[in-house]
């Protein structure tokens, strides 16, 4: 494993890999590495000649400065974990390295960024898109790996590379969960013991909502989900939506010929958790 701190060094390494006609698999992360990230990196390693991961807590995607400040930073153990599974390069740039500009680019995501996460975290997906675009242009990966855990992000990244003609294949990877169903997340480490006990209700409720789509209207399901989540003392529903999987348009009813995903955001105490489940 080799650590890379700056763009110049990275560009030289990428040129060499390209000259040798080797394929590059890339996994962008914000660190606090867990088994979800490692599943992406293992797959990138298996499916490519060279596996590159980045660790960068991207400030432009945080719309809440407290959240940015408290985001877990565990670089030493992150490096160890990536090294153990055989990651070839880890890119750990500084903020000034990634953002030399004074004004951040605005990328038109044609409304995909206006629903769900985008509605509650304005500017979040612009920040995500800007940094992922920068990484793609620098690293020129053949394949890039993203978790289905962040379903709206995955949809937006697929759209971004199509819109900007960036020649990279986006590989969706299944959500890795704890034994009790809670989706693994760097934020889980910030849950206290009581919040951690209640947090698995989120996925349990998503599974129940999926069952309900067979008989209930979407409006009824939304009410049931809200009641169920909020009946737990430390949980508070922020949103629950059933959307068409490609367009993220909220569904009014289920059409058997289309694909849908149910997405949820819940506060467990002060910690905001998201999850989703495929409906069709
Ligand atoms: P993050 O460090 O949270 O920005 O996540 C980096 C990548 O790991 C993103 O593509 C996430 O969707 C993915 N990821 C995070 N948690 C999980 C999980 N539990 N299962 C699968 N992928 C995940």
Image (spheres, rainbow, N blue to C red):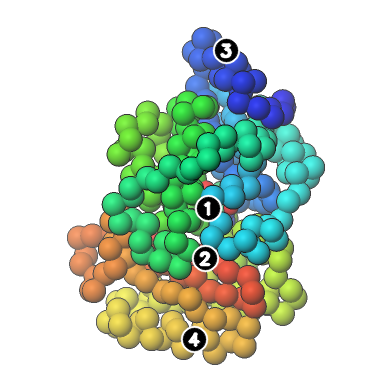
**Residue topped by disc 2:** 274
Closer mark to the observer between disc 1 and disc 2: 1
Q: Residue furthest front?
A: 102
Secondary structure under badge 2?
strand
> Where does the image place residue 236, in percent across and percent down from the top left?
54, 81
Left or right: residue 161 versus residue 120 is left
Question: Mark 4 or mark 3, which is nearer the start of the sequence?
Answer: 3
Determine the residue positioned at 51% across, 27% down.
138
Residue 215 visible at all: no
**Residue topped by disc 1:** 61
Residue 143 visible at all: yes
State yes or no: discs 1 and 2 in contact (Cβ < 8 Å): no
Q: Within 8 Å of ligand 1, the CB of disc 1?
A: no
Cα distance between the residues tagged 3 and 2:
39 Å
Question: Mark 2 or mark 3, which is nearer the start of the sequence?
Answer: 3
Q: Could you say which is closer to the camera, residue 216 or residue 199?
A: 199
**As displayed, is residue 249 above or below residue 157?**
below
Q: Could you say which is closer to the camera, residue 156 or residue 111?
A: 111
Cα distance between the residues tagged 1 and 2:
16 Å
State yes or no: discs 1 and 4 in contact (Cβ < 8 Å): no
Determine the residue positioned at 26% across, 69% down.
251
Question: Mark 2 or mark 1, which is nearer the start of the sequence?
Answer: 1
């Amino acid at each position: 494993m080799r650590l890379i701190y700056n763009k110049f060094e990275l560009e030289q390494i990428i040129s060499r890999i390209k000259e040798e006609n080797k394929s590059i698999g890339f996994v962008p992360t914000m660190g606090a590495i867990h088994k979800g990230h490692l599943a992406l990196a293992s797959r990138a390693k298996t499916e490519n000649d060279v596996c590159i991961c980045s660790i960068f807590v991207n400030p432009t995607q945080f719309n809440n400065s407290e959240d940015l400040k408290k985001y877990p930073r565990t670089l030493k153990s992150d490096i160890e974990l990536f090294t153990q599974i055989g990651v070839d390069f880890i890119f750990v740039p500084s903020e000034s390295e990634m953002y030399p500009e004074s004004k951040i680019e605005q990328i038109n995501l044609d409304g995909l960024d206006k629903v769900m996460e985008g509605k509650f975290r304005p500017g979040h997906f612009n920040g995500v898109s800007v940094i992922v675009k920068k990484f793609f242009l620098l690293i020129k990966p053949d394949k890039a790996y993203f978790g289905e855990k962040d379903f709206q992000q995955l949809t937006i990244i697929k759209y971004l590379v199509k819109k900007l003609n960036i020649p990279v294949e986006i590989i969706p990877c299944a959500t890795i969960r704890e034994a009790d169903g809670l989706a693994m997340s760097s934020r889980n480490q910030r849950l206290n013991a009581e919040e951690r006990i209640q947090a698995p209700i989120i996925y349990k409720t998503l599974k129940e909502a999926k069952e309900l789509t067979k008989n209930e209207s979407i409006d009824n399901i939304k009410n049931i989900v809200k009641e169920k989540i909020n009946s737990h003392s430390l949980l508070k529903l922020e949103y629950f939506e059933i959307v068409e999987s490609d367009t993220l348009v909220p569904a009014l009813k289920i059409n058997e010929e289309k694909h849908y995903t149910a997405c949820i955001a819940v506060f467990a105490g002060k910690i905001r958790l998201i999850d989703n489940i495929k409906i069709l």
